[in-house]
Amino acid sequence: MRNTKRASKQSDVKETLAPNHSLIFILGTRPEAIKLAPVILEAQKHTGVDIEIVLTGQHPTMCISALESFGIQPTRIMNTLKDKQTILQLSAEILIELSTLNLEWKQSIVLVQGDTTSALFGAYAGFIMGSKIGHIEAGLRTSDSRIPFPEEMNRRLITRLADIHFCATKLNALNLQKEGISENMIHVTGNTIIDALVKMTTTEIHKSKRDIILVTLHRRENQARVISEVTRIIDTMAREEEIKYVWKVIRHPNPETTAGYSEDFLHNPRVEFLSPLPYPEMVSMLRKTKLLITDSGGFQEEATYLGIPTLIIRNKTERPEALESGVCVLIKDPVKELKKSILELLLNEELYLQRSKPSNIFGDAAASNRIINLLLEPSAP
């Protein structure tokens, strides 16, 4: 990473974040790293813009690995993760460590992404220290403040701290306007995950042999009972000869996520269990995925762009655009709906073709450029 020296005179700066000339990216998880990487790369193109990349330590190894996939090195790495740590304990550690960093807070814009604990308390620390706050992927909402938990409340609180809101879609912007956020603080840019996806793709992204059924489950509200139900169904279906696809399950590092796996499922010879993959390998796998079963938010965006039929194991989604595209469908009751939905897609070619049409509803791979250009404008916060 090019680490530019701090400019001593305004005249030395070719382009400035008026009146700020410094960006502080605060992030802690793998998804944040992937979604912020294109924005960091875009910022690095501008001479005179000082960049700090602060890792909170929420997902220490995976976050660093994700940034390295884009050729980015963090400038500050915090040590906040402790064994058997609660969300409250992590929150306190992040705030304490951020308070010790010698950063030019008052001359900077703090940029956070999404709805993690790192994003919320990165924004709050910036607010307390006198920074302006930019929120990337702003305006996602469900109708329930506890679904998903705690992400839904995290993003609502970040909204109240932010000075500038970068929304992926028009619907996200409308959500903020309904909450009283001034229109001149809101910008629709597209989602930076599409920028990241395209950067990692060297061949035609919509044309690959699809022979993988990919499963990713991790949400707190699904842990134990729902994940157990889903994996029992998958265990049974994977053993059926009529389904001649490769089943791959990405295991989340949180042991609470995998606690619901049965012994039969863990030893199913037709199911391959994977650790979280480096992002280039993840993109390569997505291009070969026939069907995605997930409760992830980010995967909904990537699947919609790639046209991968997706079954979302959740009661609600903050990304209704994924449903509107026709690519994604909610599975609210896996016991009643999951097997039927899987068979319909795998055995009904006409339905599959209808559901596998790529959509750019989440962006056109230019979101990062728009975000940095907006921050470089003289009217920026």
Image (spheres, grey):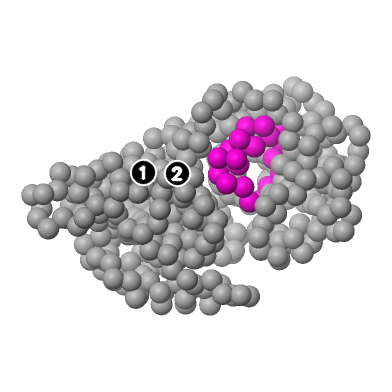
> Relative to 230, is 24 on the left or the right?
left
Q: What element carries label 1?
A: helix
Q: Which residue is identified by label 2?
A: 70
Q: Is residue 131 above or below residue 289?
A: below
In magenta stretch: residue 283: yes
Relative to the observer, which residue lies in front, 8 or 244? 8
Give coordinates of residue 358: x percent, y percent: 58, 28
What residue appears at the point 26 percent right and 47 percent down from the top-left corner? 375
- In this rendering, does residue 297 appear at all? yes
What residue appears at the point 60 percent right and 59 percent down from the top-left corner? 148
In magenta stretch: residue 203: no
- In this rendering, does residue 167 appear at all? no
> Relative to 87, is 15 on the left or the right?
left
Give coordinates of residue 262: x percent, y percent: 85, 59
CA gap between label 2 and label 1 equals 8 Å
- Magenta stretch? 276-295
| Dot 1 amino acid type | Leu
Q: In which quarter of the image is the C terminus?
A: bottom left
Relative to the observer, which residue lies in front, 139 or 366? 366
Q: Is mark 2 on a helix, strand or loop?
A: loop
| Dot 2 amino acid type | Phe
- In the rendered structure, which disc, 2 or 1, sits on the residue that comes first in sequence? 1
Give coordinates of residue 359: x percent, y percent: 54, 30
What residue appears at the point 58 percent right and 32 percent down from the top-left corner? 306
Relative to the observer, which residue lies in front, 119 or 58? 58
Q: Which residue is identified by label 1?
A: 41
> Relative to 269, is 145 on the left or the right?
left
Are circles 2 and 1 on residues that touch, CB within 8 Å?
Answer: yes
Q: How crowded is mark 1: few (under 14 residues within 10 Å), some or many (20 or more)?
A: some
What residue appears at the point 62 percent right and 47 percent down from the top-left corner? 277
Q: In this view, does 335 lie above or below 292?
A: below
Q: In which quarter of the image is residue 244?
A: top right
